[in-house]
Amino acid sequence: MVVYFLEKLRKIIKSIGKKEKKLINFINYLKYTKKKTFYDLKDENFDFFNTNTEKIKIAAVITFFFREDKIQNLVKVCDGLSNLSDENEIHIFTNNITSIQAEKLKKEIKIDINLITIDEPVHDRLLPWYHINLMKKLYFNEDITHFLYLEDDIYLNKSNFNYWLNSRKILKKFGLIPGFIRTENNKSDNQLYAIDFLKKSNFNSLPKIKINKDYNFVNNEFPYQGMYLYDRDLMREYLSGPSSNPDCGHGAFNVNFIDDRMINLDLMAKANIGLTYINPPYGFFNRIVIPFEIKKKRIAKFCEIRHLSNRYSNSQSSFGNVKLEDAVQ
């Protein structure tokens, strides 16, 4: 009998927890509405694809756990990165591999890369975090204008990068960062899925930056994107701030930065979460926003990045169950 009542109590508490989250989100939205006019830009002339005239040099870092069947995707990722600007450098961290495997990697990739082998990592799951020290060194090179860290199956194209450059200029004053949506193709219905959305989001209840009659930037609960892209200002903030520490979000690190969303991220995922949850503007869930087309009622195509492994939408998983066209409605 005691066990029965305890089980009932557990379900009630769990139900209350779900309702509490909805209440927290509603309170968050009310906070946003207090400054709603501040977030209305009314910029009819804004263009996501204005030609950039500034010198761009990108330092890109990829973590690659060596597996021969993953090399094909890594090659595509590197090809995409090589087209982002006229001047960039690509660094790849990998685990302990043989000289033959290293040569195979370089031969397959073809373009110039800096392959860094960690011979004796403390643990494989810590391998993504080795990139922090490299980023600190790269930051001292003032010729580098942008810093990119990504998983080995994230394909970023020139359209994605141009969108980010132009959007960053208008979002900077709000402390917000242009974001991307990881997508996969479901083989059974041939539809694109927003793999990191665990449920559909209601456009009207989301904090947003109103650009003009055609576009808004929307903020949502599912900002994970398997990468980060920062200019020098953002990179300085990241490297000198709490989120470049693997323990960020946990009370053992600093009670001022306890965050359930970060605690629940696995160690490898936290290596690319960056500034997402650090100092979001008043009324926003986090610092990542994505462009939304008002007339088409969908997330703008140019912020879509392909998750080349395509594994979530084609298997039983809590991820990859929301169609891209339904992600924000």
Image (cartoon, helix red, strand yellow):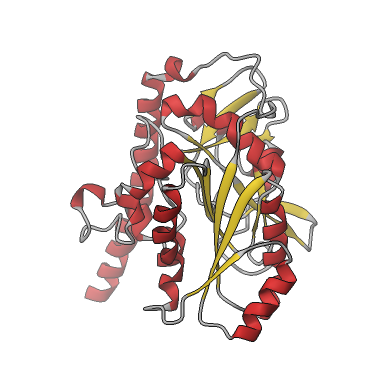
Quarter of the image with the N terminus is bottom left
Residue 325, image x, y percentages: 69, 42
Quarter of the image with the C terminus is top right
Q: Is 67 situated left or right of 260 in this image? A: right
Identity of the residue drawn at 61% across and 17% down: 212
Answer whether residue 329 is visible to the viewer in this image. Answer: no
Query: Where is residue 284, by image quadrant?
Result: top left
Q: Is 243 situated left or right of 153 in this image? A: left
Q: Is 6 situated left or right of 145 in this image? A: left
Residue 135, image x, y percentages: 44, 55
Identity of the residue drawn at 43% across and 48% down: 139
Identity of the residue drawn at 37% across and 26% down: 30
Identity of the residue drawn at 36% across and 19% down: 34
Query: Is residue 279 placed above or below 129 in the rendered structure?
Result: above
- Residue nearest the viewer, comparing 108 with 11: 108
Residue 190, image x, y percentages: 80, 56
Q: Is 69 situated left or right of 260 in this image? A: right
Query: Is residue 197 placed above or below 201 in the rendered structure?
Result: below
Answer whether residue 261 is visible to the viewer in this image. Answer: yes
Residue 31, image x, y percentages: 35, 27
- Residue nearest the viewer, comparing 60 with 74: 60
* Number of numbered discs visible in the structure rendering: 0
Query: Where is residue 214, by image quadrant?
Result: top right
